[in-house]
């Protein structure tokens, strides 16, 4: 936890609720980014971001500081977005046969996914929309927010090895999606 965040939390709990603006300013954009990646609709993401911060404020007294505030708020955001998707049944499951990517070489996948041309980035963004909400959250937290695997595990309630395996499979899945789009 950042040095002064514990102090800010103590001030908020002591009645200086205006101090909560620090957390909104510090984490608001990142939380919104995670949620919009998961739900795809900005208006929904804005509302869910507000819900996330309201839940965090209401339960601030139960924040035990075993993790950083960032980890805690991301966990709330992730669960809020998943609940929303379940309630609205907006999650589309893309069925891909895992045999399609079983024998792919890591080098081939890396070459395809590390192409940073504008056209490739657009194709990759489109492929990302076809992943599950959990997969999009993993990609966002690891590749875009550059969160450590251990923290992602805490946020998504997964072991570190499970996070690594899922990230590995997501790379392969994205590769297959890109290849299928080329056909």
Image: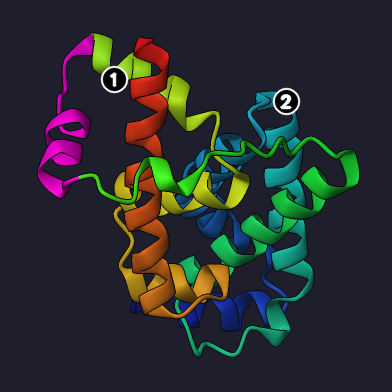
Task: State which quarter of the image contains the C terminus.
Answer: top left
Question: Nearest the camera: 105 or 75?
Answer: 105
Disc 2 residue crowd, few under 14, some 14–19, many 20+, Cα 10 Å? few
Q: Which residues are magenta?
A: 105-118
In the rendered image, which quarter is residue 112 located in?
Answer: top left
Task: Work out whether 162 lies above or below 118.
Answer: below
Question: Nearest the camera: 7 or 89?
Answer: 89
The colour mode here is: rainbow
Q: Is residue 109 magenta?
A: yes
Q: Which residue is mark 1?
A: 121
Q: Position of residue 45 (x, y in %)?
A: 68, 35
Residue 4 in sight here:
no
User: Is 120 situated left or right of 72 in this image?
Assistant: left
Q: Position of residue 154 (x, y in %)?
A: 50, 76
Q: Secondary structure at mark 2?
A: helix
User: Is 122 situated left or right of 12 in this image?
Assistant: left
Q: Which mark is residue 43?
A: 2
> Residue at (78%, 44%) from the top-left corner?
85
Task: Work out whether 151 lies above or below 121.
Answer: below
Q: Position of residue 119 (x, y in %)?
A: 26, 9
From the image, give the main secondary structure of the stretch colored magenta: helix
User: Is 106 situated left or right of 89 in this image?
Assistant: left
């Amino acid at each position: 936890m950042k040095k002064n965040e514990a102090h800010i939390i103590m001030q908020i709990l002591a009645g200086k609720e205006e101090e909560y603006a620090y957390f909104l300013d510090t984490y608001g954009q990142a939380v919104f980014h995670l949620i919009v990646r998961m739900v795809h609709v900005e208006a929904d993401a804005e509302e869910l971001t507000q819900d996330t911060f309201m839940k965090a404020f209401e339960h601030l007294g139960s924040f035990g500081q075993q993790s950083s505030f960032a980890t805690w708020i991301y966990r709330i955001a992730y669960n809020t977005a998943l609940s929303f998707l379940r309630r609205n049944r907006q999650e589309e499951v893309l069925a891909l046969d895992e045999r399609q990517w079983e024998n792919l070489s890591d080098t081939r996948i890396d070459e395809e996914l590390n192409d940073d041309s504008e056209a490739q980035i657009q194709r990759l963004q489109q492929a990302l929309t076809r992943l599950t909400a959990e997969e999009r959250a993993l990609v966002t937290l690891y590749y875009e927010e550059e969160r450590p695997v251990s923290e992602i595990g805490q946020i998504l309630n997964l072991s570190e090895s499970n996070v690594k395996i899922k990230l590995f499979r997501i790379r392969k899945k994205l590769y297959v999606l890109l290849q299928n789009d080329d056909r």
